[in-house]
Amino acid sequence: MEREALLQAVEKELPRSRFEHTLRVAETAVRLADRFGADKEKADLAGILHDYCKYWPDERMRDWIIRHHLPSDLLDYNKELWHAPVGAEAVRECLGVTDPEVLDAIRYHTTGRPNMTRLEQVVFLADYIEPGRRFPGVDEVRAVAESDLDRAVLMALDNTIRFLIDRGQKVYPLTLLARNDVLERVSGKNSS
Ligand code: DGI
Ligand code: FE
Ligand code: FE
């Protein structure tokens, strides 16, 4: 499918405000890709598609997790996590997107994971700092994202983990592993 057709498919799945978020994430991801040396076309595509399943009913997402053998531990954690791995499967099956790097950027855009590729980091961070986002601390992350991708990703993960702890919610283990991994990368940079 061409970009225009993909955009139309996404637009059908999302309310207006979420579709506009998607466009801002794509735009931000392209800028970050340019800045940090990731593939701009893939960043654009992953940005456009990353929240494809965001408004699917929980039961439909649960069904996909089971039928498509996605990690079943997801079912024990916040439902907010489901749309990312389900989205990767869905854009492959429903929209014919096959690029594994794009699919992984969608799959890990919410939780993160250890050893994230540049493209995965760029999409993860774009989702966090796109200009419509208003959460506490986002301006500090935006400032760091001007020059240091790892450190900005670390700050976003730290903020999200703190947010979950403050609300008495569970943290998905992959998010903790992602945070520990990028912390090591950042500390490695400091000590060299
Ligand atoms: O889909 P969006 O609202 O654009 O952004 P997202 O995919 O990052 O949103 C998912 C939300 O899920 C995020 O803001 C916080 C929440 N969440 C719940 N449990 C976890 C979690 N996020 C992470 N990273 N890890 C969790 O365990
Ligand atoms: Fe999302
Ligand atoms: Fe998003």
Image (spheres, rainbow, N blue to C red):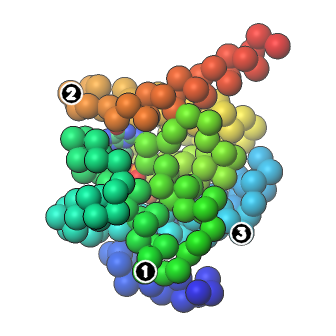
x and y percentages locating residue 51 in the rendered image: 42, 64
Residue, x 53% and y 23% (percent of image)? 180
Q: Amino acid at mark 1?
A: Cys
* 2 or 3: mark nearer the eye: 3
Q: Secondary structure at mark 1?
A: helix
Give the secondary structure at mark 2. loop
Task: Give the vertical position of 16 relative to 104 (above or below).
Answer: below
Q: Is the residue marked 3 within 8 Å of ligand 3, measured from its CB?
A: no
- On the image, the x and y values in percent for residue 108 come to 49, 49
**Kind of residue indicated by mark 2:** Gly
Q: In the image, which disc is placed on residue 168?
A: 2
Of residue 18 and residue 46, the one placed in the foreground of this image is 46
Quadrant including the C terminus: top right
Say if disc 2 is inside 8 Å of ligand 1: no
Q: Answer left or right for 23 relative to 94.
A: right
Q: Residue at x 64, y 30 (%)?
A: 151
Q: Position of residue 138 (x, y in %)?
A: 50, 40
Q: Residue furthest top?
A: 191
Q: Which residue is mark 1?
A: 94
User: What is the C-alpha distance between the residues marked 2 and 3?
Assistant: 39 Å
Determine the CA span between mark 2 and mark 1.
36 Å
Q: Quadrant of ligand 3?
A: bottom left
Residues at discs 2 and 3 in contact (Cβ within 8 Å): no
Dot 3: what SS? helix
Front residue of 1 and 158:
1
Q: Is residue 78 visible?
A: no
Q: Report the residue marked by disc 3.
A: 41
